């Protein structure tokens, strides 16, 4: 399995729409960087957030998930409460090739502030906006800036195409738009 370089990512984004919209170089002018890097792509977080709250004494149950435990915000700066959690999504829409697995890592700028980003792998032939899980591990409120970099995606090429892709399995998160809540 090989990690794919910048020129491969650029070619796949421009010729096959693997990443839309695609930013061809790192943008760092007064923002947390985003765009193409040496061996990955730094994605931006959109301005749509779902912030956990316990106003209604909701219970988090992955088998019967209720959105009552969230407040929705459309904002340029999201403040995540101390020791809390928010869901967001990428600005970019991804289309993963059949022989590629994509791994996401949080950016060090946020990690050094106690904000941890978790995204499960993007499987071969999955497509959609990526739902991002952001944990504020600090005892302080923490800011996340919309339309700036939040995480980096790494593209790993398999020795060949997989036998069964996410599309073949009709995966439950296929083609998701916006912030997508857990599904059973």
Image: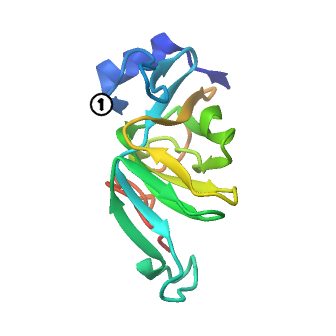
Residue 135 drawn above or below residue 54: above
Percent position (x, y) of residue 79? 48, 56
Determine the image quadrant of residue 40: top right
Q: Secondary structure at mark 1?
A: loop
18 or 29, which lies in front?
Answer: 29
Q: Is residue 182 left or right of residue 15?
A: right
Percent position (x, y) of residue 150? 51, 39
Could you tell me if residue 168 is visible in this image? no
158 or 78, which lies in front?
Answer: 78
141 or 167, which lies in front?
Answer: 141
180 or 87, which lies in front?
Answer: 87
Q: Count the marks.
A: 1
Q: Residue at x 38, y 37 (%)?
A: 95
Determine the image quadrant of residue 9: top left
Q: Residue at x 50, y 14 (%)?
A: 6
Percent position (x, y) of residue 105? 62, 38
Q: Is residue 137 left or right of residue 131?
A: right
Outermost residue toward the bottom?
57
Residue 179 drawn above or below residue 118: below
Percent position (x, y) of residue 100? 53, 32
Dot 1 corresponds to which residue? Answer: 21
Residue 106 drawn above or below residue 31: below
Residue 108 drawn above or below residue 166: above
Outermost residue toward the top?
7
Q: Residues within 10 Å of mark 1 (few under 14, many from 20)?
A: some
Could you tell me if residue 108 is visible in this image? yes
Q: Residue at x 49, y 46 (%)?
A: 144
């Amino acid at each position: 399995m090989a990690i794919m370089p910048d020129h491969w990512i650029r070619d796949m984004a421009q010729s096959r729409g693997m990443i839309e919209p695609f930013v061809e170089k790192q943008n760092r002018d007064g923002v947390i960087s985003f765009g193409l890097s040496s061996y990955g792509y730094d994605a931006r977080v959109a301005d749509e957030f779902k912030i956990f709250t316990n106003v209604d004494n909701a219970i988090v149950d992955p088998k019967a998930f209720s959105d009552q435990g969230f407040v929705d915000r459309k904002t340029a700066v999201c403040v995540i409460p101390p020791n809390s959690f928010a869901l967001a999504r990428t600005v970019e829409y991804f289309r993963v090739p059949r022989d590629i697995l994509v791994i996401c890592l949080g950016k060090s700028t946020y990690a050094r502030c106690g904000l941890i980003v978790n995204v499960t792998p993007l499987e071969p032939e999955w497509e959609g906006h990526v739902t991002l899980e952001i944990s504020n591990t600090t005892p302080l409120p923490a800011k996340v800036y919309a339309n700036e970099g939040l995480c980096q995606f790494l593209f790993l090429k398999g020795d060949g195409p997989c036998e069964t892709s996410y599309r073949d399995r009709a995966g439950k998160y296929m083609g998701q738009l916006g912030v997508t809540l857990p599904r059973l």
